[in-house]
Amino acid sequence: MTAVVEPAAAAGEVGAARRRKEDARLITGRTRWTDNIALPGMLHLAILRSPHASARIVSVDVRPARRQPGVIDAFSGADIAEIQGSLPCAWPVTEDIVHPVRPPLADGFVRHHGEAVAVVVARDRDSAVDALEAIEVEYEPLTPVLDLAAASRDEGLVHPDKGTNRSYTWIFDSAQAGTGTDVADAAAAAEVTLHRQYIQQRLIPAFMEPRSVVVDPGMGEYTIWSATQIPHILRVFYALLTGVPEHKIRVIAPDVGGGFGGKLQVTPEEMIAFFAAQRVRRPVKYTETRGDSMLSAHHGRDQIQDITLTATRDGTLTGIDVKLVANMGAYLGLVGPGVPILGAFMFNSIYKVPAYRFECVGVFTNTTITDAYRGAGRPEATYAIERAMDDLADQLGMDPVELRRRNWIKAEEFPFTTVAGLVYDSGDYDAATDKALDLFDYAGLRAEQQRRRDSGDPVQLGIGVSTYTEMCGLAPSRILGALRYAAGGWESASVRVLPTGKVEVVTGTSPHGQGHVTAWSQIVADELGVAFEDVEVLHGDTRTSHKGLDTYGSRSLAVGGVALVEACRKVRDKARVVAAHMLECSPDDIEFTGGAFRVRGTPSSAKTLADTAFAVFAAHDLPDGVEATLDADATFDPQTFSFPHGTHLCATLVDTATGHVTIHRYVAVDDVGKVVNPLIVEGQVHGGVAQGIAQALHEQAVYDESGTLLTGSFVEYTIPSAADLPHFVTDRTETPATSNPLGVKGVGEAGAIASTPAVVNAIVDALRPYGVDDITMPCTPERVWRAIKRGGAS
Amino acid sequence: MSSSHRVRVSVDVDGSRYVDDVEPRTLLVHHLRERLGKIGTVIGCDTSNCGSCTVLMGSADGEQHSVKSCSVLAVQADGTAVTTIEGLAGPDGALHAVQQAFHELHALQCGFCTPGMILSAVDLLRENPAPTEAEIRAGLSGNLCRCTGYQNIIRAVQSAATALRGAAAAVLPSEVTV
Ligand code: FES
Ligand code: FES
């Protein structure tokens, strides 16, 4: 080891459009989905689900199923009543929240279509499914409570023993919080008032990989594979709910095929499979069908939003008053009650508003539970404020961009404490908007719009604006605690340096499409001066990664990535001491540049990480008191959220004869701070925008008057195909976050937050001459056509 | 529904012949996954809407077309040759141009739709070697992806089309002389 070997990768991995390491097996079919797992002796589980939205279970007889060929076991809720407990809600947002018991397998009552009632365990999938038919259940149907507004007035009760459908009322008032003035005063003094009611329809996350779980009970040491976003959280809850000690439980999230919040849950099926494996003492697998998934995996959104804006005649906002009714479904999900509360901090968005009040009532109905879906509370809030800003601009006769510009926080005003009490660290709304207007050719499209209006063109053009911010990087543990969330928001990383200088990274994040293996490798390459290829990233298995809080809320990079940087810097500090010893100088004389430890002033005297790793491995000549390892762990708990922002502009062509909407142009300029991998960032924006457009135009979960889910498959629940979506123009501005050493903000949810109001604003804008000022999503041709007819008639 | 009645099915999958006795109701996708261990092919729905299960199927010596293997019975595959995502790369492991393009252009995130999407794209390019963006969007409309918003998938198919045409052109010149 005489010559200094220059490291393969000098600085510069972060920011590079690295192709993903994950792809190799995904494009060749060598994948590890949970449903691919086959263990010796493994049995299969099928679940009988309630056909009723509300019913008393008079009797369940599983004995005929037990006599079917290939059947090992069959049981109902009553059979496991002693042990099954209640599924958890980790976010009881108020002290007096009404939190009904939610057994994994219904016991006594069913409260939504699709609730699990009985189970068959059999030698193969077909035998299990066939035997379900032999189970005899007698129901006494009850009248379901389905209409959200009526439910909020307690017209019929979902849980009669609770005496109300109202789970909680949560209020934020800037006058009381000391973050602003009183909305009542603002209302009294208002020169202009705009009141709107918007409906956030119910959506289904519809990740492409159906959920699946395998439970191997071993000899009391449980190994569980689950298609989950949250292996670490799931392990804790398995321990709490089953009484099996935590150290006897290993949870693995292998390849997971999308989540979007939909796999941020502790599910009935995960618990049922556990109890089944416990009963039969053999490995058990449950893989849901798409039909099961639509019925039982949690839904998202579903709010009635009443929003009042007050302003001066020149368009300066003076107050925002929001009243929400949020549909919880039949029970409380893992974080369901907290979802609208995340939105509470976002209705004021990027605007300087002196007075703000928010009130949310969480309400039970006889429907599938709702919980986090991409954006979780923030898309709903952004939709309401951005729709209302366009409507206010119309009322004032102002350009919607100018109205926003008049009210938003200026670049030089950061850090800025908002009326909701958050401190935005950074941003440049002018820069992002100007770039978007330019790419969009705003002036050109406005002229085109005028031409079509003047000529009475049956195809009208509309322009929709959406300027958004969001809170990412969930989350500062102290804030979560103050909001009554049961867990913290830190993230953890470990870096192990192997003797040959290769690096293993263990992360507590749990990717399911986000490309962490690639992005984390880029970060480590720069921090430690090793090659991108020489980094292995381990995740999603509580045996290798024992500590973590998983992936949701655009937190992985902004929290987990920062933990990784801190762990790398600890490694560097250790290696620096070893390098100094090898180079016979003081550690203070060593600097880490160009990917190696160099003697200040004599840069050719250098040692790489690999040199120090081998020296530590041999340990023949370590400085006194230096441990024979370079490994390091770090846990990062952010002090504040991060606040990505951006401007999305949408132009739609609306055929006034048919109601058909075409997205003519879509421009997204996002500011997500520093970017580790622009390919991945762009991909996240594309996917998010697509899901937001889907909410605007395509998707809605619909129940009939008996509480039967009508959109129980991809035939009725129409997630968009390639033919339904436009080409997106995406670009970025880059205002680094000041709250973390990477300067990153998070990108997973931005597209879904920004795009929905941009699209609906564009449709409404096209139709304002027809007297249309709102269309309830999804804006299907029929609804658009009806709105035109209605508007024209008024 | 008796499981005693079984039918002999012989099918070539990714170059190997498999002869099995299967229940008449067995779907090809279940046969592939559960009997033959071909777990690269996945199931995303139960209504033939998502395309996750797409494979190429045809006569042993002729053309193969994309089919949704959840809408074909295993017995219907008797005597056919099937290519799954696991058999698309060359014997030396060299990626097919469509696989390579999906990687280069970041056309996958979670990767669950990817096997079906790639095989549908292969078939699309066989039928139409130079598709427009609109033709690609229409041609892949039977394959749902929840992650990507499709834009990079479209780019990847365009790029693969160019690569495949280039490869075809590279083979042709000796015959096509002007
Ligand atoms: S599994 Fe969805 S189309 Fe075959
Ligand atoms: S990449 Fe996830 S569904 Fe297409």
Image: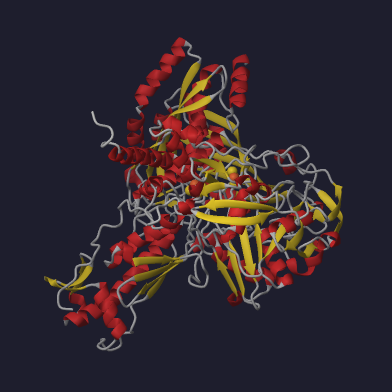
Q: Is residue A261 visible?
A: no
Q: Is residue A207 visible?
A: yes
The spot of residue B26 in percent (x, y) is: 67, 50
The spot of residue A528 in percent (x, y) is: 29, 68
Q: Quadrant of residue B173?
A: top left
Q: How many marks?
A: 0
In the shown orientation, is residue B103 left or right of residue A293? left
Quadrant of the snapshot with the N terminus of chain A: bottom left
The spot of residue A682 in percent (x, y) is: 39, 45
Q: Nearer the viewer, residue B59 or B155?
A: B59
Q: Is residue A406 above or below residue A267?
A: above
Q: Nearer the viewer, residue A406 or A341?
A: A341
The spot of residue A549 in percent (x, y) is: 51, 64
In the shown orientation, is residue A678 left or right of residue A72? left
| Residue drawn at 74 percent across, 37 percent down | A704
In the shown orientation, is residue A433 left or right of residue A340? left
Q: Is residue A218 above or below residue A60?
A: below
Q: Is residue B133 above or below residue A785?
A: below
Q: Nearer the viewer, residue A161 or A359?
A: A161
Quadrant of the snapshot with the C terminus of chain A: top right
Q: How is the image coloured?
A: secondary structure
| Residue drawn at 51 percent across, 59 percent down | A255
Q: Nearer the viewer, residue A315 or A614?
A: A614
In the shown orientation, is residue A351 left or right of residue A502? right
